[in-house]
Image (cartoon, rainbow, N blue to C red):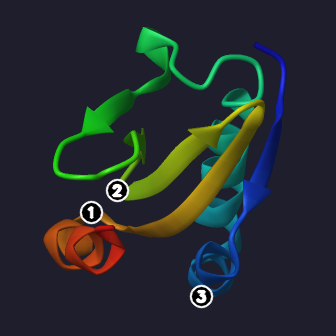
């Protein structure tokens, strides 16, 4: 699947407070999702407890939560892994 990636406003705000070097690495990892968002070697796992299929991408110490909607990957949030539980609770449908 060749698609495109959209970053939600919430994720954009979260990326703005991350240091530029780390932000670049996260954005490069997110860009890989354009080619195949569910490729097993892309550090992607399906999350349980969501109504629509939701996935998380591991990028160093950070996590990006996204959904695949037709040919668009929508990145909903990007956060430090220390805040995983809190962020996932706030994203539940």
C-beta proximity under 8 Å, tags 2 and 1 = yes
* Residue at which label 3 appears: 17
- Res. 69 image quadrant: top right
Q: Residue at x 66, y 52 (%)?
A: 74
Q: CA distance from mark 2 to mark 1?
A: 6 Å
Question: Quick one: 68 or 9, which is closer to the camera?
Answer: 68
Residue 82 as seen in the image, left or right of residue 19: left
Gap in angstroms between the C-alphas marked 3 and 2: 15 Å
Is 7 situated above or below 71? below
Dividing the picture into quarters, in which one does residue 57 lie? Answer: top left
Q: Residue at x 53, y 46 (%)?
A: 67
Q: Quadrant of the C terminus?
A: bottom left
Name the front one of labels 2 and 1. 1
Mark 1 Cα-neighbour bin, 10 Å: few <14, some 14–19, many ≥20: some
Residue 15 pos. (x, y %): 63, 75
Q: What is the x, y in percent for residue 4?
A: 84, 38
Checking the image for residue 81, the label placed there is 1
Q: Quadrant of residue 65?
A: bottom left
- Label 2: which residue? 61
Answer with mark 3 or mark 1, whichever residue precedes in sequence: 3
Q: CA distance from mark 3 to mark 1?
A: 15 Å
The crowding category of the residue bearing disc 2, from other C-alpha atoms within 10 Å (few below 14, some 14 to 19, many at least 20), is few
Q: Quadrant of the N terminus?
A: top right
Q: Residue at x 27, y 52 (%)?
A: 50
Helix, strand, or loop for circle 2?
loop
């Amino acid at each position: 699947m060749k698609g495109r990636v959209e970053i939600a406003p919430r994720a954009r705000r979260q990326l703005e407070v991350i240091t530029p070097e780390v932000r670049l690495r996260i954005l490069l990892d997110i860009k890989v999702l354009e080619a195949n968002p569910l490729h097993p070697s892309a550090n992607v796992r399906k999350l349980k407890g969501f109504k629509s299929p939701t996935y998380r991408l591991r990028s160093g110490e950070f996590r990006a939560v996204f959904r695949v909607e037709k040919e668009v990957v929508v990145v909903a949030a990007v956060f430090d892994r220390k805040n995983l539980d809190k962020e996932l609770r706030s994203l539940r449908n």
